Image (spheres, rainbow, N blue to C red):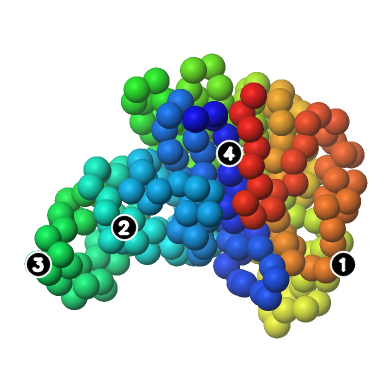
Amino acid sequence: MPDRLVLLGSKGGPALRPGGPWPSSSLLEIGGRCIIVDCGLGVTRGVVDAGISLKALDLIFITHLHSDHVLELGPLLHTAWTAGLAAPVAVFGPPGTGHYWRRFCQAMEFDIEIRIVDEGRPDIRELVSISEFGEGEVVEQRGLKVMALRVDHPPVTDCFALRFDHGGKSVVFSADTAFFPPLAEFTAGADILVHEAMLEEGIERLVAKTGNGARLREHLLASHSFAEEAGRIARDGGAKRLVLNHLIPADDPGIGEADWIAAVRKTWAGDLTIARDGLVVELA
Ligand SMILES: [Zn+2]
Ligand SMILES: [Zn+2]
Protein backbone atom coordinates (compact mmCIF):
# COMPACT_ATOMS: atom_id res chain seq x y z
CA MET A 1 0.00 0.00 0.00
CA PRO A 2 1.70 3.26 -1.09
CA ASP A 3 1.75 6.07 1.46
CA ARG A 4 -0.84 8.70 0.62
CA LEU A 5 -2.94 11.53 1.94
CA VAL A 6 -6.60 11.69 0.93
CA LEU A 7 -8.48 14.92 1.55
CA LEU A 8 -11.93 13.63 2.40
CA GLY A 9 -13.58 16.92 3.33
CA SER A 10 -11.99 20.21 2.32
CA LYS A 11 -14.26 23.06 3.39
CA GLY A 12 -13.92 25.23 6.47
CA GLY A 13 -16.94 25.55 8.74
CA PRO A 14 -19.92 23.26 9.39
CA ALA A 15 -22.54 24.51 6.90
CA LEU A 16 -23.38 22.46 3.81
CA ARG A 17 -24.63 23.93 0.55
CA PRO A 18 -25.88 22.21 -2.62
CA GLY A 19 -23.00 21.05 -4.78
CA GLY A 20 -20.43 22.23 -2.27
CA PRO A 21 -17.62 20.35 -0.52
CA TRP A 22 -17.85 18.76 2.94
CA PRO A 23 -16.33 19.76 6.32
CA SER A 24 -12.91 18.79 7.57
CA SER A 25 -11.58 15.25 7.51
CA SER A 26 -8.49 13.60 6.06
CA LEU A 27 -7.11 10.10 5.65
CA LEU A 28 -3.37 9.53 6.01
CA GLU A 29 -1.93 6.15 5.08
CA ILE A 30 1.67 6.00 6.22
CA GLY A 31 3.85 3.01 7.08
CA GLY A 32 0.89 0.65 6.87
CA ARG A 33 -1.14 2.67 9.37
CA CYS A 34 -4.59 4.00 8.56
CA ILE A 35 -4.98 7.38 10.24
CA ILE A 36 -8.00 9.68 10.24
CA VAL A 37 -7.41 13.34 11.06
CA ASP A 38 -10.61 15.14 12.09
CA CYS A 39 -14.13 13.83 11.73
CA GLY A 40 -16.30 16.51 10.20
CA LEU A 41 -19.63 15.55 8.69
CA GLY A 42 -19.08 13.15 5.77
CA VAL A 43 -15.96 11.42 7.13
CA THR A 44 -17.58 7.96 7.08
CA ARG A 45 -18.66 8.29 3.45
CA GLY A 46 -15.23 9.73 2.60
CA VAL A 47 -13.33 6.81 4.13
CA VAL A 48 -15.50 4.27 2.29
CA ASP A 49 -15.19 6.19 -1.00
CA ALA A 50 -11.40 6.16 -0.54
CA GLY A 51 -11.60 2.36 -0.67
CA ILE A 52 -10.89 1.77 3.00
CA SER A 53 -12.85 -0.87 4.92
CA LEU A 54 -14.36 0.63 8.07
CA LYS A 55 -13.17 -2.54 9.83
CA ALA A 56 -9.60 -1.33 9.19
CA LEU A 57 -10.00 1.81 11.31
CA ASP A 58 -6.87 2.11 13.39
CA LEU A 59 -5.99 5.59 14.67
CA ILE A 60 -8.15 8.72 14.83
CA PHE A 61 -6.90 12.19 15.75
CA ILE A 62 -9.07 15.23 16.50
CA THR A 63 -7.40 18.66 16.32
CA HIS A 64 -10.12 20.52 18.29
CA LEU A 65 -13.75 20.23 19.26
CA HIS A 66 -15.38 22.60 16.76
CA SER A 67 -18.22 20.66 15.14
CA ASP A 68 -16.74 20.85 11.63
CA HIS A 69 -13.90 18.67 13.02
CA VAL A 70 -15.66 16.32 15.44
CA LEU A 71 -19.39 16.06 14.62
CA GLU A 72 -19.11 12.66 12.92
CA LEU A 73 -16.58 10.98 15.25
CA GLY A 74 -19.28 9.01 17.07
CA PRO A 75 -21.17 8.04 13.90
CA LEU A 76 -17.89 6.95 12.23
CA LEU A 77 -16.98 4.66 15.14
CA HIS A 78 -20.52 3.36 15.51
CA THR A 79 -20.83 2.61 11.78
CA ALA A 80 -17.44 0.86 11.81
CA TRP A 81 -18.71 -1.20 14.72
CA THR A 82 -21.85 -2.27 12.84
CA ALA A 83 -19.62 -3.02 9.82
CA GLY A 84 -17.78 -5.61 11.90
CA LEU A 85 -14.99 -3.74 13.64
CA ALA A 86 -13.34 -6.22 15.94
CA ALA A 87 -9.91 -4.70 16.66
CA PRO A 88 -9.42 -1.80 19.06
CA VAL A 89 -9.46 1.73 17.72
CA ALA A 90 -7.43 4.44 19.44
CA VAL A 91 -8.81 7.98 19.39
CA PHE A 92 -6.60 10.93 20.36
CA GLY A 93 -8.22 14.29 20.94
CA PRO A 94 -8.06 17.44 23.06
CA PRO A 95 -9.56 17.55 26.58
CA GLY A 96 -13.31 17.01 26.23
CA THR A 97 -13.06 14.25 23.62
CA GLY A 98 -13.80 11.58 26.25
CA HIS A 99 -16.86 13.52 27.39
CA TYR A 100 -18.15 13.70 23.80
CA TRP A 101 -17.65 9.94 23.33
CA ARG A 102 -19.30 8.92 26.61
CA ARG A 103 -22.32 11.11 25.89
CA PHE A 104 -22.53 9.80 22.32
CA CYS A 105 -22.62 6.24 23.65
CA GLN A 106 -25.33 7.28 26.12
CA ALA A 107 -27.38 8.84 23.32
CA MET A 108 -27.07 5.61 21.32
CA GLU A 109 -27.49 3.32 24.33
CA PHE A 110 -30.66 1.63 23.08
CA ASP A 111 -29.05 0.64 19.78
CA ILE A 112 -25.70 -0.35 21.32
CA GLU A 113 -27.27 -2.58 24.00
CA ILE A 114 -29.66 -4.24 21.58
CA ARG A 115 -26.94 -5.04 19.02
CA ILE A 116 -24.71 -6.56 21.69
CA VAL A 117 -27.54 -8.88 22.76
CA ASP A 118 -29.20 -9.46 19.38
CA GLU A 119 -26.15 -9.64 17.09
CA GLY A 120 -23.52 -10.81 19.58
CA ARG A 121 -21.26 -7.83 18.95
CA PRO A 122 -18.43 -6.87 21.30
CA ASP A 123 -19.11 -3.83 23.47
CA ILE A 124 -18.12 -0.75 21.44
CA ARG A 125 -17.29 1.05 24.69
CA GLU A 126 -14.50 -1.47 25.25
CA LEU A 127 -13.26 -1.45 21.65
CA VAL A 128 -12.66 2.28 21.52
CA SER A 129 -10.04 3.95 23.68
CA ILE A 130 -9.90 7.73 24.05
CA SER A 131 -6.67 9.51 24.96
CA GLU A 132 -6.76 13.23 25.61
CA PHE A 133 -3.54 15.05 24.74
CA GLY A 134 -1.90 18.44 25.19
CA GLU A 135 1.11 20.01 23.57
CA GLY A 136 4.13 17.77 22.96
CA GLU A 137 4.39 14.08 22.10
CA VAL A 138 0.97 12.50 21.54
CA VAL A 139 2.00 8.93 20.80
CA GLU A 140 4.97 6.91 19.58
CA GLN A 141 4.14 3.47 18.34
CA ARG A 142 5.63 1.00 15.81
CA GLY A 143 7.81 3.67 14.19
CA LEU A 144 5.04 6.26 14.03
CA LYS A 145 5.60 9.42 16.03
CA VAL A 146 2.90 12.04 16.49
CA MET A 147 3.56 15.49 17.96
CA ALA A 148 1.10 18.29 18.83
CA LEU A 149 1.58 22.06 18.84
CA ARG A 150 -1.00 24.37 20.40
CA VAL A 151 -2.03 26.89 17.73
CA ASP A 152 -3.90 30.21 17.77
CA HIS A 153 -7.63 29.63 17.26
CA PRO A 154 -9.55 31.82 19.71
CA PRO A 155 -11.80 31.40 21.54
CA VAL A 156 -10.84 27.70 21.41
CA THR A 157 -7.68 27.22 23.49
CA ASP A 158 -7.23 23.46 22.99
CA CYS A 159 -6.57 23.44 19.27
CA PHE A 160 -3.51 21.52 18.08
CA ALA A 161 -1.50 21.24 14.90
CA LEU A 162 -0.33 17.65 14.42
CA ARG A 163 2.88 16.26 12.96
CA PHE A 164 3.13 12.64 11.82
CA ASP A 165 6.59 11.11 11.25
CA HIS A 166 7.23 7.60 9.98
CA GLY A 167 10.25 6.11 8.23
CA GLY A 168 11.69 9.50 7.27
CA LYS A 169 8.38 10.79 5.90
CA SER A 170 6.40 13.50 7.58
CA VAL A 171 3.03 15.21 7.23
CA VAL A 172 1.91 18.24 9.23
CA PHE A 173 -1.68 19.45 9.69
CA SER A 174 -2.04 23.07 10.82
CA ALA A 175 -5.50 22.54 12.32
CA ASP A 176 -7.53 25.79 12.48
CA THR A 177 -5.29 28.73 13.26
CA ALA A 178 -4.63 32.39 12.71
CA PHE A 179 -1.17 33.12 11.24
CA PHE A 180 1.09 31.38 13.75
CA PRO A 181 4.85 31.63 13.05
CA PRO A 182 5.87 28.77 15.45
CA LEU A 183 4.15 26.45 12.97
CA ALA A 184 7.08 26.96 10.60
CA GLU A 185 9.53 25.38 13.04
CA PHE A 186 7.01 22.61 13.76
CA THR A 187 6.78 21.99 9.99
CA ALA A 188 10.61 21.76 9.62
CA GLY A 189 11.12 20.11 6.24
CA ALA A 190 7.88 18.10 6.23
CA ASP A 191 7.00 16.32 3.01
CA ILE A 192 3.50 17.79 3.17
CA LEU A 193 2.10 20.74 5.11
CA VAL A 194 -1.70 20.75 5.10
CA HIS A 195 -2.59 24.30 6.09
CA GLU A 196 -5.98 25.93 6.48
CA ALA A 197 -6.64 28.95 4.27
CA MET A 198 -9.09 31.70 3.53
CA LEU A 199 -9.26 34.12 0.65
CA GLU A 200 -9.60 37.82 1.37
CA GLU A 201 -12.00 38.77 -1.43
CA GLY A 202 -14.08 35.68 -0.70
CA ILE A 203 -14.52 36.67 2.95
CA GLU A 204 -16.23 39.93 1.97
CA ARG A 205 -18.61 38.04 -0.32
CA LEU A 206 -19.30 35.47 2.41
CA VAL A 207 -19.92 38.16 5.03
CA ALA A 208 -22.33 39.97 2.70
CA LYS A 209 -24.23 36.70 2.13
CA THR A 210 -24.67 35.57 5.75
CA GLY A 211 -26.90 36.99 8.46
CA ASN A 212 -24.40 37.89 11.20
CA GLY A 213 -21.79 39.37 8.89
CA ALA A 214 -19.81 41.62 11.24
CA ARG A 215 -19.40 38.94 13.93
CA LEU A 216 -18.44 36.36 11.33
CA ARG A 217 -15.78 38.62 9.84
CA GLU A 218 -14.36 39.30 13.32
CA HIS A 219 -14.16 35.56 14.10
CA LEU A 220 -12.57 34.68 10.76
CA LEU A 221 -9.88 37.36 10.98
CA ALA A 222 -8.97 36.51 14.59
CA SER A 223 -8.95 32.73 14.21
CA HIS A 224 -7.96 31.78 10.65
CA SER A 225 -5.13 32.33 8.14
CA PHE A 226 -5.09 33.86 4.69
CA ALA A 227 -3.66 31.77 1.85
CA GLU A 228 -0.64 34.09 1.69
CA GLU A 229 0.04 33.39 5.38
CA ALA A 230 -0.16 29.63 4.83
CA GLY A 231 2.43 30.14 2.07
CA ARG A 232 4.74 31.95 4.49
CA ILE A 233 4.57 29.07 6.99
CA ALA A 234 5.34 26.54 4.24
CA ARG A 235 8.25 28.65 2.97
CA ASP A 236 9.73 29.42 6.39
CA GLY A 237 9.31 25.79 7.46
CA GLY A 238 10.86 24.39 4.28
CA ALA A 239 7.87 22.17 3.46
CA LYS A 240 8.22 20.08 0.29
CA ARG A 241 4.55 20.53 -0.62
CA LEU A 242 1.82 22.85 0.60
CA VAL A 243 -1.78 21.68 0.56
CA LEU A 244 -4.34 24.44 1.09
CA ASN A 245 -7.28 22.94 2.95
CA HIS A 246 -10.25 23.96 5.16
CA LEU A 247 -11.01 26.51 2.46
CA ILE A 248 -13.07 29.60 3.33
CA PRO A 249 -15.04 30.26 1.26
CA ALA A 250 -15.31 26.81 -0.26
CA ASP A 251 -18.54 26.98 -2.23
CA ASP A 252 -18.62 30.42 -3.81
CA PRO A 253 -19.13 30.00 -7.57
CA GLY A 254 -17.24 33.29 -8.04
CA ILE A 255 -14.07 31.82 -6.45
CA GLY A 256 -12.07 29.15 -8.25
CA GLU A 257 -8.78 27.28 -7.97
CA ALA A 258 -7.00 30.03 -9.95
CA ASP A 259 -7.90 32.58 -7.24
CA TRP A 260 -6.37 30.39 -4.51
CA ILE A 261 -3.24 29.82 -6.57
CA ALA A 262 -2.85 33.54 -7.31
CA ALA A 263 -3.07 34.38 -3.59
CA VAL A 264 -0.65 31.74 -2.33
CA ARG A 265 1.90 32.34 -5.10
CA LYS A 266 2.67 35.72 -3.51
CA THR A 267 4.54 33.85 -0.76
CA TRP A 268 5.02 30.25 -1.91
CA ALA A 269 6.84 29.08 -5.05
CA GLY A 270 7.03 25.35 -4.25
CA ASP A 271 4.81 22.34 -4.95
CA LEU A 272 1.18 23.20 -4.32
CA THR A 273 -2.15 21.42 -4.04
CA ILE A 274 -5.52 23.12 -3.57
CA ALA A 275 -7.69 20.63 -1.69
CA ARG A 276 -10.99 19.27 -2.93
CA ASP A 277 -13.02 16.38 -1.58
CA GLY A 278 -11.54 12.98 -2.45
CA LEU A 279 -8.26 14.35 -3.82
CA VAL A 280 -5.29 12.01 -3.33
CA VAL A 281 -1.78 13.34 -2.66
CA GLU A 282 0.90 10.66 -2.96
CA LEU A 283 3.69 10.72 -0.39
CA ALA A 284 6.76 10.45 -2.64
ZN1 LIG B 1 -12.83 24.43 11.26
ZN1 LIG C 1 -12.20 25.61 14.40
Label 1 C-beta lies within 8 Å of the nearest ligand 1 atom: no
Among numbered discs 1 and 2, the one appearing first in the sequence = 2
Residue 195 as seen in the image, left or right of residue 172: right
Residue in the foreground of this view, choosing between 174 and 91: 91
Identity, as a three-letter code, of the amino acid under mark 1: Gly
Q: Position of residue 110 (x, y in %)?
A: 18, 75
Position of 224 relative to 162 (above/below): below
Position of 184 relative to 98 (above/below): above
Task: Determine the CA span between mark 3 and mark 4.
Answer: 38 Å
Q: Secondary structure at mark 2?
A: loop
Task: Determine the CA span between mark 3 and mark 2.
Answer: 16 Å
Which quarter of the rendered picture does the C terminus lie within? top right
> Are the residues tagged 1 and 3 within 8 Å (C-beta)?
no
Looking at the image, is mark 1 or mark 3 nearer the viewer? 3
The residue indicated by pointer 1 is 254
Among numbered discs 3 and 2, the one appearing first in the sequence = 2
Question: Which quadrant holds residue 250?
Answer: bottom right
Q: Is residue 74 visible?
A: no
Identity, as a three-letter code, of the amino acid under mark 4: Leu
Identity, as a three-letter code, of the amino acid under mark 3: Val
Residue 99 as seen in the image, left or right of residue 166: left
- Labelled disc at residue 5: 4
Residues packed near mark 2 inside 10 Å, few (<14), some (14 to 19) or many (20 plus): few
Task: Determine the CA span between mark 1 and mark 4.
Answer: 28 Å
Among numbered discs 1 and 3, the one appearing first in the sequence = 3
Residue drawn at x 21%, y 56% as measured from the top left: 124
Identity, as a three-letter code, of the amino acid under mark 2: Ala
Q: Is residue 226 visible?
A: yes
- Labelled disc at residue 117: 3
- Labelled disc at residue 83: 2
